[in-house]
Image (spheres, grey):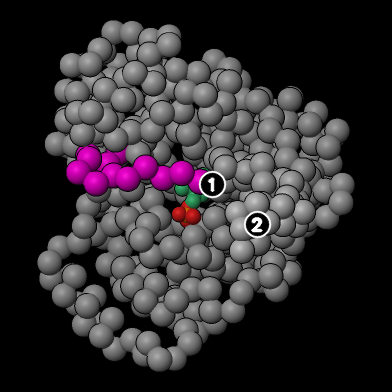
Amino acid sequence: MSARNISEQIQKWVRPAVRALQAYHVPDPAGLVKLDAMENPYGWPAELTEQWLARLAQAELNRYPDPAAHELVARLRPAFAVPDDSALLLGNGSDELIQLIMMAVAGPGRCVLAAEPGFSMYRMIATFVGLDYHGVALNGEDFALDSDALLAAIERHQPAVVFLAYPNNPTGNLFTRAGMEAIIRAAPGLVVVDEAYHVFAGGATWMPQLPQYDNLLVLRTVSKMGLAGLRLGILCGAPGWLEEIDKLRLPYNINVLTQLSVAFALQHEAVFSRQAERICADREALQAALQEIAGLQVFPSRANFVLFRAPRGRAGELFAALKARKVLIKNLDGSHAMLHDCLRVTVGKAEENDAFLTALQAVL
Ligand SMILES: *Cc1c(COP(=O)(O)O)cnc(C)c1O
């Protein structure tokens, strides 16, 4: 075995598109105030943790999980107000569902389309499965949907799938419903509305509209509401579409502990809605405080993070100086032309947000 041989074999066999990829990089958060990944900062009350552990103790780890996760689906349907005529498909995070959707439509000449700046996994997964990807720029001023540009791109590229995050990540805004509706009507294939931040969006959702559109799918996740460690995404839509996508799902993709834990959590939904309310209130406070700081441009958010623009050329320096002061946020400068000088901070606990604001003011 020699390094040279291996690298020749890699050149020969690993697809060029894969060789050109950069592995998804997650910074080590040890010892830092972690405000980079849209996690819910809160845990559970002690008595809830005890009840949960008692439930987990009954899990049969020697058995495969229920492949269709019947009990969990039965709890998710009312909890997420999925319309009666719509089906649910569960993924190991919504990332897996995005991958399954794309695998179902991938083929020569096929493409997916998404609004940009947007969620980076749409482009990455398209590349993984060999789909062409087209990003269509949002409005440069406020990141509003540019429906005319999107409609023109749909006409031109005839995408198999269009992805729209509602609210959008990393910009935090909700697109207008009229603009989205025009896209759903014009799209020749699927439109996936990704509602990862639904619990922070003040009720804004396309879930009730599912029965009205043949080509609409709604994607949810339990990650941002406070269960990121469990990895569970939920795809909702017409049974016909989901039956096809389900064929690509690996059996037992949702493990026993996740099935039990999410089902348990949904029985205690009030805990999570209180946490979401707290986070939304703290988001408003954080936004207001950022707006007070001279030289920053703050973009209004309906999610659990805030995007802001640093004084020109200073994002990298601010990011590093915050990190040196033990606060980890996300530097988006360089990730997309429209995100120049932009940083994104997740709404944490009040004291974490204060630590961030204090550090930011000190370094500015
Ligand atoms: C975080 C995020 C996801 C991924 O969620 P998982 O369920 O944790 O895989 C999907 N879409 C958007 C827009 C996100 O921001």
- The quarter of the picture where the N terminus appears is bottom right
Mark 2 vs mark 1: which is more N-terminal?
2
User: Is residue 364 at least partly visible in the picture?
Assistant: yes
Task: Tell me the residue at 57%/30% (across/down).
Answer: 117
Above or below, 111 against 214 in this view is: above
For residue 32, above or below residue 161: above
Where does the image place residue 339, in percent across and percent down from the top left? 51, 22
Quick check: 181 left or right of 355? right
Amino acid type at mark 2: Ile
Q: CA distance from mark 2 to mark 1?
A: 19 Å
Residue 29, x across and y down, in percent? 28, 44
Q: Give the labeled residue for mark 1.
A: 23
**For residue 269, which numbered disc appears in the image?**
none
Q: Badge 2 is on which residue? A: 6
How many dots with numbers?
A: 2
Q: Is residue 330 above or below residue 231?
A: above
Look at the numbered disc 1 and give the secondary structure of its residue: loop
x and y, in percent, of residue 79 in the image? 42, 64
Q: Nearer the viewer, mark 2 or mark 1?
A: 2
Which residue is painted at 73% across and 40% down in the image?
Answer: 133
Tag 2, which secondary structure? helix
Answer whether residue 176 is magenta in the image.
no
Residue type, mark 1 in image? Ala
Bounds of the magenta segment: 24-35
- Which quadrant of the figure has residue 249? bottom right
Name the outermost residue toward the front. 2
